Image: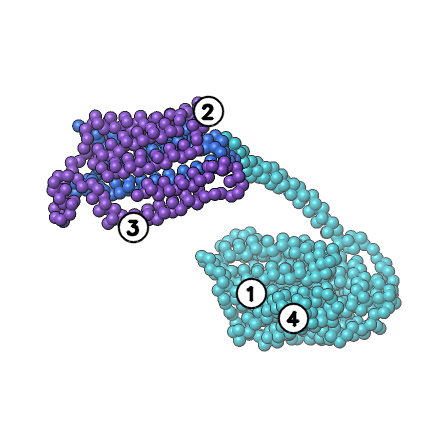
Chain colours: A blue, B purple, C cyan
Amino acid sequence: MTPTLNEYLFISGLLFAIGLGGVIIRRNIIVIFMCLEMMLAAASLTLVAFSRFNTVDGLPDYDGQVVVFFIITVAAAEVAVGLAIIVSLYRARQTINTDELTSLKG
Amino acid sequence: MMPSPLFYLLAALMFTGGLMVVFMRNPVSSALSMVLSFIGLAGLFVGLNAYFIGILQILIYAGAIMVLFIFIIMLLDLKKEDEHPRRGAAMAAGIIIPVVLLIQLAGVLATEQDSPKVPELMLQEQAAEYDKETIIHKRLADNRLPDVHLTGRKIFTEFNFPLQIIAVLLLVATVGCVALSKKQTKTVVKKLPAQRIPTIASAPDLTSKKND
Amino acid sequence: METLPWFLLLLPLASAVIIQLALKYSATASSMLSTLSVVVTFIISCFLIGSTAEGYQPWISIGGLDLGIGYKLDQLATGMMIVVTGIGMLVHLFSLGYMKDDKAKARYFAGLSLFMFSMTGIVLASNFIMMFIFWELVGLSSYLLIGHWYQKNSAADAAKKAFLTNRIGDFGMMIGILMLWGVMGTVVFADMNVGHFSGLCTCLTGAIILLIFCGAVGKSAQLPLHVWLPDAMEGPTPVSALIHAATMVAAGVYMMARVFLSLGITPENMEIIGNAPDVIAWVGGITSLVAALMATQQDDIKKILAYSTLSQLGYMVMAVGLIAPEAGMFHLYTHAWFKGLLFLGSGAVIFSCHHEQNIWKMGGLFKKMPITSITFLIGTAALTAVPFTSGFYSKEGILHAAEHAHNQPLFWLAVCVAALTTFYMFRLFFVAFLGQARDHGAEKAKEVPLIMWLPLAALAVMAFVSPWLSQSILPIAQSWDLNLHVMPPMNTAFFASIGAFTVGIAAAFVLYFGKDKDPVNIPLFRNKFYCDEFYARLIKYFQDALAAIIHFFDEFLIAGMIVGGLSRSATGIGNMFRRYAQSGNLNSYSFLMAAGVLLVIYFTVFY
C-alpha cells in the first residue's frame, strides 16, 4: 500500500494553503517571507511527485527534479536579497510590521 | 517507495510544522517550526526516490536559509514585534482563503477517480542504456538508483545553459545584497544606532556561502 | 499639348506657394511673380483656344469610385479660361497700381494667385469631386481676399458672412453631387448621360439638379443667399472686379452649364428633370428684379455695381433655367469684361477720390478723369445694352431665349429689369461723373496712372469686340448655335430692349441730372428689402432656440448625465477602492490577490 499521486498533490496543496494563510494572517514581514518559502517548497513537492509518477524508461523523469534544483537555488538567492531588503527597510523605518508599512496607501 | 503510514507521518510532520510557522508568535519559533516542516518535506522527497533533492532541501533550507532568517531575526531584535492582538478579520480571511483553495483542489482531484499508482522502477533493464564503465551502469545493474549521478548528468547535459544562467543570477544576487547593505544616504545613516551598521554589512557573506 | 493644361493649373499655385513661403516680406517681387504667372497662363490659354484634350492623374480609388485630378478641355472650358485669365491678368496689372501702398501687398498677391489656381481648377475640372474641391478653394480665397483689410471689423465680418453663406449652398451641392453619383455611378463629366435618369421619378432627378443648383445659388449669389455679395465689396476693388463680378460669381453659371452640357439636357428632353428648370429660371428672374430694385437706391458706388452684378447673374441663371445655357454663358462671357471694366473704373474713381465711395460726395469727375470716365461710360453702355455694345447682343440672347421658351412672364420681367438697369446705371453716371464736385476728394481728383488706365482701356475695347471674338471661343456645343448679326432682326425682343433702355435713361435723366441729393427715397429698396434684418432675426430666434435645445442636450444630458455621470461614477468607484481596498497593507493586498486567484480558478475550472 503506497500513497497515490492525488495524495501527494493534496499534501502539497495543503502546505501551499498554510503558507498562503500565513501570508494573509501574519504581520511580521520576516514570517511572511518564511510562509512564501513554504509555498515555494509546496510547488517543489508537486514537481517531484510528478517526476516520480511519470517514469521515463523505468527511471523517474529527472527533468522535474532539475527544475526543483533550480527552484531551490533561486529561492536561496531570493532569500538573500529579500532579507537584505528587509534589513534596509528596517534601517529606514525602524519597523517590519506591515501594519505600519502603509506608504502605498492611496 | 515508502508505505502509506510513513507517508502520513511525514505529511503530518510537515503540516504541523507549517501550522506552527503561522501561529507561533515568536518569529524564532516560527523559523524553527519551519525547519521541522522542511524535514518532513525532505522525508517526502526521499520517499519519492528523490534523494538528492531531499538532501538539498535539508542542507539549503534548514542549514543555510533558516540560519539566515534566525540571524536576521536576532539582528533586528524582533521578539516583541508581533505582540499586537491579532485582528479577527485578518484571522478569518487567512483561514477562509486557504480552506476554499483546498476545497477547490479537492474538487479538481476528485474528478480523477482512480489516481495513478506509483509505477515500478526498472533499474536493471535500464542499465544497458549506459556505458559499462560508468557508475550509473554499475549501480543500475546492482538494482540501486544512482539518483545524484542521473540528476547531475541531466543538469550538465540538457540543462547546461540554464545552469550558467543560474550562476549569473547568484552573482547578481550577491552583488545586490552588497549594494543593499552598503551605507545608505547620510540622512538615513544618522537615524540608525551606530553599532548596527557593521553587523548588517556582513549579511551578504552568508548568502554566498549557502550557494555552494 | 498634353502638359500645357497642367501648367495652367500649377503656375498660379506655384506662385501662391512661393510668395507665401519665401517672398512674404518682398512686396515688389511677389507682385511681379504673381503678375508674371497670370500673364503666362493667359498666353497658354490663348494657345489652347478651341482645343479639346483630357488629362488624368489618379488620386483616390475607393471601391467603384475613382477620384482623380484631371482636366477636360473643351470649348466651354477654354472659353471660360480666356475670361478668367484675361480679366485676371488685367486685374493683376490694375492691382499693381491700386495696391501700390498697401502694407500687405505680398499677402494680397498670394491670395490672388491662390484664387487664380482655384478658379482654373473649377474651369478645368474633369469630375465633379475635383470641381467641388476647387469650388471650396475658391470660397477660401474669396474669404481671404474679402478679409484682406481684416483690421476693419466690417471687412472681417463680410468675409465671414461670405464664407458661411456659401457654406449653406455648398452643403446642398455636396448632397446633390452624392445623389448624382448614386444615380449615375460616376462623377466624371465625360461619363455622364441623361439616359441614366430615365425611369427615375422626376422628383428625384429634379431634386438632384436643384441641390446642385444650391451651390450655384450660394456662389452666384442668387436669392435667398445673395446677401453676401454686396458685403463682399469690403474687399479691395480689384478683387471685387475679379472675383465678385467677373469670374467666381459666374462659376455657378459655368457649373450649371457644365452639368447641363455633360448630362445632355436639351429643351427636347427637359421633362426628365421635372420642374427644376422652371425653379431655376424663376430664382434667376426674381433675383435679377429684386437686385435691380435694390440697386436704384444705393449710394455706395461699389454697392450699386454689386447689385447690378446680382441682377446680371440672375439673368444668366434665368437663361440656364430656360435650357438656354449658351445664352447664359454668352452673357457671362460679355458681362465679365464690361463688369470688370466697371469695377476697375470704380476702383480708379475711388483711388482718385481718396477712398471715397459715396456717389453723392463725387461729381464732376468727367473733366478731371477723362479716360476713366469714358471707359466707365462704355462699360455702362454695355451693361445697359446700348446697341452695338457687347451687352446688347448677350441680353438680346437671353430675351430671345425667354421668348423662345414661350415664357411671357419671364420675358417681361427681364425687360423690366433691363429698364431698371439703365435707370440705376445712368443715375450713378449722372451723379458721380457729371455736375459739380461735392467734396474735397472729388475736387482734387486727377487721372490715374498708366498702369491703371491701361487695363481700363483694354476692357473698354473688349466691351465692344467681345461678342465677335466669342464666335471662335464660345460656340460651346454643337447643339448650341449663336446667331450673331450686326443688326439683329426686328422682333419683339429688339423693340422691348430698345424701349426699356429709352425708358430707363429718360427716367434717370429727369430724376437725377444735375441733382445734388437724392430726390427719391424708398426705404424698402434702400434697406435691401430688409433681407439682412430678416436673416438676423431668423438666426437670432430660430438658431438661438435650436442652440438652446442642443445646449441643453449637450450640457445636461450628454455632458452631465452620460459623459459626466460615467466619469463621476468611475471616480466614485475608484475612490471607494482607493479608500477601502488600497489600504497600503501588505496582508490585505495578499488577501485580495488570493481571492482573485480563487475566483479565476473558480471561473476557469468549475464554472
- Residue C362 screen position, x and y as percent: 83, 65
Residue B3 falls left or right of residue B67 = left
Q: CA distance from mark 4 to mark 2?
A: 90 Å
- Residue A26 screen position, x and y as percent: 41, 28
Q: Residue furthest front?
A: B195
Dot 2 amino acid type: His
- The mark lying in front, picked from 1 and 3, is 3
C302 or A74: which is nearer to us? Answer: A74
Dot 1 amino acid type: Ala
Q: Which mark is residue C34?
A: 4
Which residue has dot 1 on it? C125
Q: Residues within 10 Å of mark 4 (few under 14, many from 20)?
A: many
Of callouts 2 and 3, the N-terminal one: 2
B98 or A96: which is nearer to us? Answer: A96
- Residue C97 screen position, x and y as percent: 74, 71
Q: CA distance from mark 1 to mark 4?
A: 22 Å
Which residue has dot 2 on it? B84
Are the residues flagged by discs 1 and 4 from a single subunit? Answer: yes
> Could you say which quadrant of the image residue C557 lies in?
top right
Is C199 situated above or below C45? above
| Residue at left offset 78%, top offset 61% | C300
Which residue has dot 3 on it? B161
| Residue at left offset 62%, top offset 62% | C138
Q: Residues within 10 Å of mark 1 (few under 14, many from 20)?
A: many
Is C256 situated above or below A6? below
| Residue at left offset 69%, top offset 72% | C28
Are the residues flagged by discs 3 and 4 from a single subunit? Answer: no
Of callouts 1 and 4, the N-terminal one: 4
- The mark lying in front, picked from 1 and 4, is 4
